[in-house]
Amino acid sequence: MAVDLVDTHDPHVIKPPVHKSSKLEKRAPLVATGLSLILAIIKLTVGIMSGSVALLASAVDSIMDMFVSVFNFLAIRLSDKSPDEQFQFGYGKVEALAATLEGLVVMGSGFFILYESVQKFIHKESVTHISLSIAVMGVSIVIVGILVAFLAYVVKKTNNMVIRADLLHYKTDLYSNGAVLLSLAIIYFTDWYWIDILFGAAIGIYIIKEAYELVEEGTHVLLDVSLPEEEVEKIIDIVKKDPRVTDFHFLKTRYAGKYKFVEMHIVLKPEMQLLQAHRISDAIEEKIKKIDPESQWHILIHLDPYDDSDMHNF
């Protein structure tokens, strides 16, 4: 079965296969950090000068982006650590933890933006330096657009959960930056300063919604959510199509970062030799791995001479 020995004093301790993050995966958060820092400085400076709550909200979001990307880089490095005596299944869930924390941070920035919108509405503050603000947001959209394209490329190549979280995060930035630019353009041509407050609040609500989805996905992984239904159905189909397997039960699946875990009991003929039973198990494992060749699979198959499903309470 698909297990390897840990390099410890106990030869019975097992671990999932180790998969190291690529240079592309490690480089993506650093690129995002650098661009976020540049955008945060520019937006914050012009936002303070102009008094635009939408622009200040975007600046706060860029600052959050910077710290989150640094955290994501550290999370990817940690997830590369090999399983050890304390964490024998590896550090794959670090990616889910990072995505969850990122979502909470982003959600906090969304509530802050809503608060600033309310304050500006109460104090009836106006926006100045509109032309400069429009120029800044135009540059910001171009930079974030390039970053989104780069992160999308990395996700397509690696399917890294942390990078996917970052991609979703910067997509919300791209939309929010577009909304800020639109609000500034409307103010420039109409002097409707209340538009800035309206758009600022809308951006805050949108960010909170997207952040909730990040938190939900990360929490599901931390709570050992099962593999997607279509993958589970493929696993069941593989087992059922093997004529040597008379039945199966206790199928359980989960995933953590780059790793996918499958456990099950298969029922074989009682008189079957151990070597033959082992080969059947190996054949099933190899077919399951082909469902998603890009992931690292940890498959544990228990061989039963009869159906013992009613003897356990799983």
Image: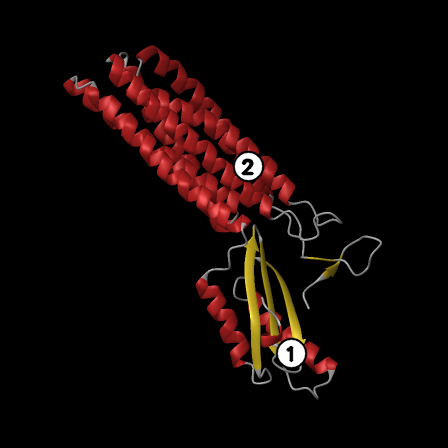
Q: How is the image coloured?
A: secondary structure
> Percent position (x, y) of residue 123?
26, 12
Label ID, residue 21: none
Residue hosting label 1: 280
SS type, badge 1 = helix
**Residue at the far bottom in the pictured view:** 271
Residue 92 visible somewhere in the drawing: yes
Which of the two residues, 216 or 297, is positioned nearer the viewer here?
Answer: 216
| Type of amino acid at the residue the image marks with label 2 | Asn
| Residue 48 in the figure: left or right of residue 246 | left
Find residue 24 and report its image quarter. Answer: top right
Q: Position of residue 114 (x, y in %)?
A: 33, 26
In the displayed structure, 30 sits above or below 15; it is above
Crowd class of label 1 (few under 14; some 14 to 19; many from 20; radius 10 Å):
some
Q: Quadrant of residue 3?
A: bottom right
Q: Report x, y in % for residue 212.
A: 41, 41
Q: Point out the image quarter for the N terminus.
A: bottom right
Name the spot of residue 245 as percent of width and height, x first.
59, 82
Please say whether residue 127 is visible from this viewpoint: no
Q: Between disc 1 and disc 2, whose residue precedes?
A: 2
Q: Amino acid at mark 1?
A: Ile
Q: Is residue 243 left or right of residue 85?
A: left
Q: Residues within 10 Å of mark 2 (few under 14, many from 20)?
A: many
Q: CA distance from mark 1 to mark 2?
A: 41 Å
What residue would you read off at disc 2?
72
Q: Residue at x 47, y 50 (%)?
A: 156
